[in-house]
Image (cartoon, rainbow, N blue to C red):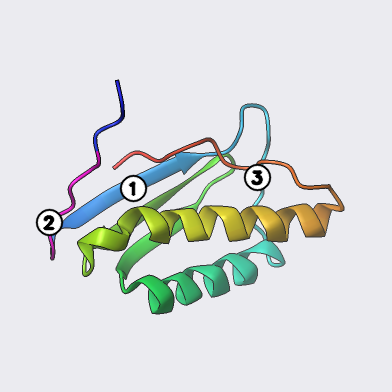
Amino acid sequence: MPNLRSFYPKDTVLYISSSTEEGLPFIPNSVINPILQGLIARAQDLYGQEICHFIMMSNHFHLILKVTDPDNVSSFIGYIKSNSSRAINRLLGRGKRTVWCEGFDS
């Protein structure tokens, strides 16, 4: 059975979280934090969502998001996850490898 598309009404507030791959520590620090903040700011510009708050933890992140464009919520989160994976892999000198688990909870 195919996955049903999620519905995110305009101007609702979502609490979103996503985890890193099992066993992969993710240490937000003075090098990684500015990169992540820049990616999130760029994602806001591209996909028109409004972030109320976010926090990066050692193996997951939490994001409070006000939906301003219901059609772009998944693309917005996908942009953050894929681009942060690329940046983290470059910093660690790793090849193209996954950092985040598939999908997100909202």
Mark sitting earlier along the chain (2/3) = 2
Q: Look at mark 1 in the image and give the residue it sits on.
A: 16
Name the residue rendered at 41%, 79% in the picture: 45
Mark sitting earlier along the chain (2/1) = 2
Seen from the viewer's position, the closer of residues 7 and 38 is 7
Farthest-out residue, top: 1
Q: Look at mark 2 in the image and give the residue it sits on.
A: 9
Residue 96 placement (x, y as % from top left): 76, 47
Q: Which segment did they paint magenta?
A: 5-11
Q: Which residue type does callout 3 highlight?
A: Phe
Residue 70 placement (x, y as % from top left): 21, 60
Q: Nearer the viewer, mark 1 or mark 3?
A: 1
Mark sitting earlier along the chain (1/3) = 1
Q: Helix, strand, or loop for circle 3? A: loop
Q: Look at mark 3 in the image and give the residue it sits on.
A: 26
Name the residue rendered at 45%, 56% in the picture: 55
Residue 95 placement (x, y as % from top left): 83, 47
Q: Say which quadrant the C terminus sits in.
A: top left
- Residue 54's tag is none
Q: Which residue type does callout 1 highlight?
A: Ile
**Magenta-drawn stretch contains 97:** no
